[in-house]
Image: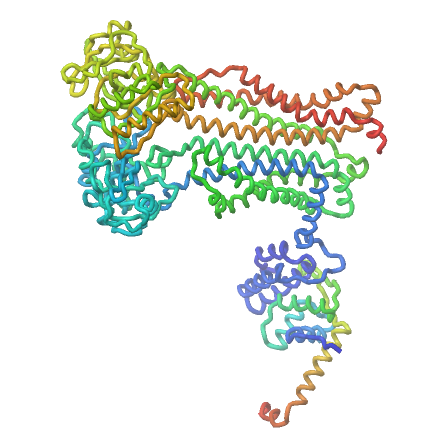
Amino acid sequence: MKRAFLGEFEEVVLLTVAILDEEAYGVTVTQEIEQKTGRAVGFSTVHTTLQRLEEKGYLASRMGGATAERGGRRKRYFTVTAAGRKALAEVKQVREELWNALPPQTLQLMGG
Amino acid sequence: MSNTPPRFATWLLEHFGHPDSREEVQGDLLELYDYWVKTVGVRKANWRYSLNALKLLRPWAQSKTAKKYPQPILVSPAMIRNYVKIAWRNLSHAKVFSLINGFGLTLGMTCALLVFLVIVHETSYDKHHKNGDRIYRVETANNSDPNTHPGTYTEMAVVLPKEAPEFASIVPIYYQWGKGLAVPASGEFFKERVAFTNSSLFQLLDYQWVTGDARTALSQPDQVVLTESYAKKMFGSTDVIGKTIRYDTKEDLRVTGVLKDYPKTTNFPFDVLVSFPTLKRVQPDFDSHGWNGFGDNFQIYTLLKPGFRPEQLTSRFHAIQVKYQKDPKTIEHQHFVLNPLSQLHYSFNFSGRQANSKLLNILALIGAFVLLIACINFINLTTAQALKRAKEIGIRKAVGSNRLSLIYQFLTEAGLITFLSTLLCMLLAWLVLPSIATMMGLPLTASDLFTWKIGVFLAGLAGLTTLLAGTYPAFRLSGMPPIWALKSNKLPQGERSATLRQGLVVVQFTVSMILISSALLINRQLSFFQNADLGFNKAALITVGLPDNKPEKLQTLRAQLMESPQIKEVSFSFNSASAESNWMQGMQYRKGATPIEIKTQMKMGDSHYLDTYGIQLLAGEKLRDTDTSKASFKIIANEIFIDRMGIREPADAIGQKVYFGDGQEFATIVGVAKNFHVNSLHQKIDPTVIQVVPNNFYQAGIKLQSETPTTESIQAALGTIEKAWKTTFPNQVFEYDFLDKTLAQAYQNETRTSQLIETSTLIAILIACLGLFGLATFSAEQRTKEIGIRKVLGASVTSIIALMTKDFLKLVAIAMLIASPIAWYAMSQWLQNFEFKIGISWWVFALTGLLMAVIAMLTVSFQSIKAALMNPVKSLRSE
């Protein structure tokens, strides 16, 4: 089976969306990534990544939740699709396989 | 909330963000902005907001797959492909309309392109010189005359360096229009233009050297510098330093340098440059310290030091005049002017061609007019055709096409036709350029057509034409309510649009009519020039130059020529009875209380002058060849001259004395000649006297026996003349002219204007007819049913043709009413240029109107007859 390809940032965004569950839209995802990883990410980057993930079918979106602070504009909420969950799982599995293949002494060196 | 994000970024996002995600992105950014203001401060928040907004503009951020109900982007590649495809289908569907449209536009654009080419050429003279903006020509101006003289006093070249420190360099140029040059080594001889100048010329203008040193090449006597192509022409190579050229069979010159050829666009087309000190050797009577008179062939060019303005030298020039000019009257009447290099091409210059800024303006106007007519055609035809497309537009609108996309659609159609026309116009321009260049006397070649300037111009022209021709139909057609189109298959045929269309046709015909009547009038003036009674006979007269006017040489030449049975008479003279360059001199008649000053044109000719040129003698006797003694000058005056003297009867003038020169010398009038045109018909006849001065005989006028010689007899006569001339003047280049042709050259400008107007008239008529034809086609189609019913009810074919034609003739009549006064005004302005001119008669305009009416009838009749002859069953059956 062909494995899904996920870029590093795509993976982070996809995971964040999964973490935020029902509350995932552009702003929250950006802020969450900033807080969790400590790195400054541009909103535009997050936005395009979200769009890309949606095109790939890993995310689904719906509009809703207009508030006054955004000038009455609706938000686009994202949720992880089944394909998205599968892709995340695959990535995790690959990582774990790779970690497991690491010889113990190297692991010690890195930890030390 | 006190803080708002940068407005410009918001605006950008609003207009250029991707429509699919516009809403949430705007919302998200607003929310984040508040967050940023709280966490990192206003400045950073502003910065981040703008940066993110920028990054989210198309095409950086856009989703590749469309949403379920995407908002259309009207200029996306897919839509553009669609526009072009539909445009192409429409064009090929209505072939006749597209052809008429395309052809008209091509003609209009070709006109505009050629006009642009000519204007670019004429304005590009001497633009390549580094110091160009500081170069000026010293010109002499009479206070009474708005036109300055390009030449000046020879002494000025000596005086200026001493008296005017504002000049960085001062370059005298003495130009000889045709001098014999021989290469002793090969024995070949040439007749070339020669410029006498000095080394400072090379500081003034930018030259590139093949060999030679700019500082010394023209500093000593007997030095000559050639251009590359002339070195090849005379010696066959460019390695010519130190070789010898013999000037005028007298003086040997040494080649000291070879220059790269100059560009076409220069007012200094010097191929043979001779050092200035040489001039005194080859022409001992050249007055290098003259303050008495000046000629056009001696000019002084100057390089002003940086920071000085030409106006600052006015007082300097006046001081020079006061110091050196001996004649107080001249000081009073004359002043000097500095004419910048950029203006030289519009006045007399050494290139022998001068641009006429008026003609250039007329040209630009004509080009714009013809293009406008073509665009009007396009608008007319497109709106007319819209009826056929009413259903298409209606359905497009009904299924949700918005107005913008329809506008794009129509603009694309206009653009496509324009694009094809542009390609065709390049081809057409390339084809006709050689004949245009000959007609205008311009050194233009096909390579001038393929420059970046022309490319930019064409692109601009295509864009402009698209907008000009496409905007009106686009907005008009796209604004139609669809219900009209779908319900009755009919446009809201308001009176306004019909009137507008007719108005456009009237404009076209007005322009065409102005051009036609102008062409007619200009032609009449030209034929007036050709057939006017000049007071002398210009037919069958050949003129040849005299390189040498020693009396014994002239005697032998005359004897040899007179032997020939074809030759009736020969006269040696300064110039012909009418000539471009003249000798003017002040004369004084002292009979009355106050002496009368008469500015007189001097005609110097021998005893045969009157007979050769067929000038009539009213009183007195002819001159004799012996009338040369200083003590008793004898002259023949013309009627104007004695009229100025205050004498009515020619016989009374005989024996009167007139004074000239220093006021002691005088001449006696021995004869009075009937007036003859000493100048071209642009000017009045000057007071003129004829006098025998063998020193100033520079040409021979040879009158043939037959008034209307055949080609063979001319050839035979020319053979005789050449043989006699060559034996008298060996080693010289023989050249001859026919007097009537030389005189016709004075009207070259007018001939050119007439040819131009004729050509543009043709094009304008052609385009207007195309438009009319298109409209007639349209109107015939629109009225098919009406005509069918009329026929069924018993209308005759003639009455239907009349019905169809009447409308268009009405337009022609209106156009005539508008065009006639405009043409009359323009032409009376033009005729102001001439002292002798035709009157403008009303029938010219009547003829124009008639002509236009006939043309319009012919154009329309094809469609009218077709419509009238159609079987009504056919037109009524199809519903």
**Residue B475 appears in the picture as rendered:** yes
Q: Would you place residue B864 above or below residue B186 in this image?
A: above
**Residue A22 appears in the picture as rendered:** no
The colour scheme of the drawn protein is rainbow
Instruction: Name the outermost residue toward the bottom.
Output: A105
The residue that appears at 74% across and 42% down in the rendered structure is B393
Front-lying residue, B446 or B514? B446
Count of labels in the image: 0
Locate residue B877 relative to residue B230 in the image: left or right: right
Residue B30 placed where, x, y %?
A: 63, 62
- Indicate the quadrant containing the C terminus of chain B: top left, top right, bottom left or bottom right: top right
Residue B835 placed where, x, y %?
A: 39, 18
The residue that appears at 82% across and 30% down in the rendered structure is B875
Residue A10 placed where, x, y %?
A: 66, 73
Front-lying residue, B643 or B72? B643
- Indicate the quadrant containing the N terminus of chain B: top left, top right, bottom left or bottom right: bottom right
The residue that appears at 74% across and 60% down in the rendered structure is B67
Q: Would you place residue B739 above or below residue B437 in this image?
A: above
Which corner quadrant of the image does residue B864 belong to?
top right
Which corner quadrant of the image does residue B377 belong to?
top right
Residue B518 placed where, x, y %?
A: 51, 23
Which corner quadrant of the image does residue B651 belong to?
top left
The residue that appears at 19% across and 14% down in the rendered structure is B667
Locate residue B587 relative to residue B513 in the image: left or right: left
Locate residue B614 relative to residue A71 in the image: left or right: left
